[in-house]
């Protein structure tokens, strides 16, 4: 397996002791295989020539300009990878779509490959093999996946043979019954649908969290109760300040855009509303913070614990913390940020120079919490649960507020200490009710 990238710096990092991404267990895997059957290189041409099978895993971000901007997937990198493959291939190849792509991308890519390959008689078989792994659990998801999905032109012999070749690769460690084959379009659409359905579950429970706060129900009890229904199941029912990550929003917008392109406006609107509910949840959180603190957070130090879009990753793409921080800054807050994995440089890139005038990044939680008026929990890092909250209470301004956007802390214990606690979808603290005039 040779991993190639045009970016020399990134490949150097993959070849060093400091891998360019943080992922539990990844270091061990790379160290065990690097130089044996795993190589990292910028020599794309040589790797393409030598390969029998090429996994294309380039970015497919949301288009920022032009037709379908803000919704459609930008396939620029995909097309340029395909053009390079075509230009440098001198033997038959199996091309595997690993990137998440709009339905029927394989068809377009096949045209680019066929019309740009100068070598005579070279044949390309295109397969779709969507990646379902989640960050933070990537290695487990890889070694013991729920399923592996391989889409190909199973209606003809060449397509069936290409699928079988890739099935054989996975069968080295995945039980055969977990390796599914499908036609190309079904495989491509399954990936978008899986992410859209997962995100929809979160938006649904987040919608209920708002209702819980009005009625005195507890969203955790509701989640637990409905999760016991085997048709619903217990996973992905944690109310949160909002879902983030590189995939959910991008894939839903992409799916909705495809629906629009096929004249299915009602279907598109249904999926857009999942993103709309996610935005509402972030806005609602900021509103709670402001109203609880007597309608003003101007110049108040607010400790923000966590910036990554979920625990066990340093990834901040589409993290709800960006919108929450921006919302609080708009109201004049001074944010004291601590995240165990996200470096200040990343926060700067996400928030921009102007916002950074109101954000201080700390290397330890103690400094972030000293003299703070409130704590907001943005990421469910385990270490936040282990802090000595009694001690933290002592060093904060009073009344000291905790806004738990992930429902990970022991709220009864915090209230006992003296904190005013807001937890998503939980019965509202009487102090907050009176502050908000509710
Ligand atoms: C997701 C899909 O799970 C994965 O299959 C796909 O390959 C890529 O996109 P990932 O983005 O790594 O994976 O994270 P995921 O664990 O799905 O979480 C996404 C967001 O939803 C996070 O912000 C997380 O905190 C949030 N979330 C998740 C909730 O708010 N509540 C939940 O119950 C679960």
Image (cartoon, rainbow, N blue to C red):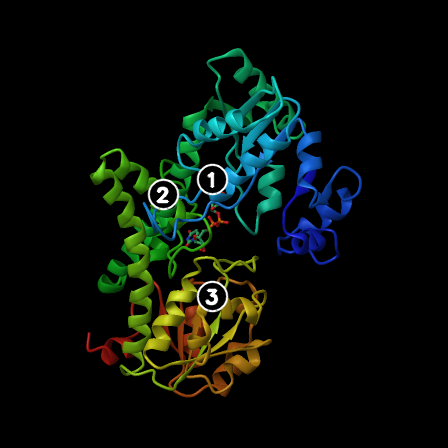
Count all numbered tags in the image, as a single digit: 3
Q: Which residue is mark 1?
A: 100
Ligand 1: does it lie within 8 Å of the C-beta at label 1? yes
Q: Depth check: 436 or 65 in front?
A: 65
Crowd around label 3: few <14 · some 14–19 · many ≥20 (10 Å) = some
Contact between marks 2 and 1 (CB within 8 A): the answer is: yes
Element type where label 1 sits in the image: loop
| On-image quarter of the C terminus | bottom left
Image: 143 above or below 16: above
* Residue at the extreme top: 157
Q: Which residue is mark 3?
A: 350
Element type where label 2 sits in the image: helix
Distance from the alpha carbon under mark 2 to that under mark 3 = 22 Å
Q: Residue at x 56, y 31 (%)?
A: 96
Q: Position of residue 415 (x, y in %)?
A: 40, 76
| On-image quarter of the N terminus | top right
Q: Position of residue 221 (x, y in %)?
A: 35, 54
Ligand 1: does it lie within 8 Å of the C-beta at label 2? no
Pick whichever of labels 2 and 1 is earlier in the sequence. 1
Q: Using the rendered image of the protein, determine whether residue 404 is visible from the camera's viewpoint.
A: yes
Image: 258 above or below 222: above
- The label shown at residue 137 is none
Pick whichever of labels 2 and 3 is earlier in the sequence. 2
Q: Depth check: 115 or 323 in front?
A: 115
Image: 106 above or below 411: above
Find residue 430 and report its image quarter: bottom left
Pick whichever of labels 3 and 1 is earlier in the sequence. 1
Q: Which residue is mark 2?
A: 254
Q: Depth check: 324 or 373 in front?
A: 324
Q: Using the rendered image of the protein, determine whether residue 409 is visible from the camera's viewpoint.
A: no
Element type where label 3 sits in the image: helix
């Amino acid at each position: 397996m040779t991993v190639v990238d045009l970016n020399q710096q990134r490949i150097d990092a993959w070849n060093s002791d400091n891998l360019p991404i943080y992922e539990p267990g990844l270091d061990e895997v790379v160290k065990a295989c690097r130089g044996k059957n795993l190589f990292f290189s910028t020599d794309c041409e040589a790797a393409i020539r030598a390969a029998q099978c090429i996994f294309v895993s380039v970015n497919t971000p949301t288009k920022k300009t032009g037709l379908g901007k803000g919704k459609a997937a930008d396939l620029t990198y995909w097309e340029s990878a395909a053009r390079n493959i075509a230009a440098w291939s001198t033997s038959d190849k199996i091309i595997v779509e690993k990137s998440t792509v709009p339905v029927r991308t394989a068809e377009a890519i096949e045209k680019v490959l066929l019309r740009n390959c100068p070598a005579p008689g070279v044949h390309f078989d295109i397969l779709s093999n969507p990646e379902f792994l989640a960050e933070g659990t990537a290695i487990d998801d890889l070694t013991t996946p729920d399923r592996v999905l391989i889409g190909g032109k199973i209606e003809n012999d060449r397509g069936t043979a290409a699928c079988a070749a890739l099935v054989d690769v996975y069968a080295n460690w995945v039980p055969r019954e977990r390796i599914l084959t499908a036609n190309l379009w079904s495989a491509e659409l399954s990936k978008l649908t899986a992410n859209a359905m997962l995100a929809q579950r979160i938006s649904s429970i987040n919608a209920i969290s708002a209702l819980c706060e009005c009625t005195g129900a507890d969203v955790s009890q509701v989640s637990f109760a409905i999760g016991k229904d085997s048709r619903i199941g217990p996973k992905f029912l944690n109310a949160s300040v909002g879902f983030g990550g590189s995939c959910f929003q991008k894939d839903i917008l992409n799916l909705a855009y495809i629906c629009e392109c096929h004249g299915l406006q009602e279907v598109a609107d249904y999926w857009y509303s999942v993103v709309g509910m996610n935005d509402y949840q972030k806005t609602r959180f900021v509103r709670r913070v402001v109203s609880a603190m007597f309608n003003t957070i101007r110049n108040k130090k607010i400790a923000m614990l966590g910036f990554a879009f979920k625990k066990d990753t340093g990834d901040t793409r589409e993290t709800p913390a960006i919108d929450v921080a921006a919302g609080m800054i708009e109201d004049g807050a001074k944010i004291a940020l601590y995240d165990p994995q996200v470096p200040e440089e990343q926060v700067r890139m996400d928030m921009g120079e102007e916002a950074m005038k109101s954000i201080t990044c700390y290397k330890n939680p103690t400094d972030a919490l000293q003299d703070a008026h409130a704590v907001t929990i943005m990421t469910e890092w385990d270490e936040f649960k282990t802090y000595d909250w009694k001690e933290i209470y002592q060093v904060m301004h009073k009344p000291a507020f905790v806004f738990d956007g992930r429902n990970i802390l022991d709220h009864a214990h915090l209230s006992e200490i003296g904190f005013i606690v807001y937890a998503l979808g939980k019965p509202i603290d009487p102090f907050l009710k009176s502050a908000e005039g509710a």
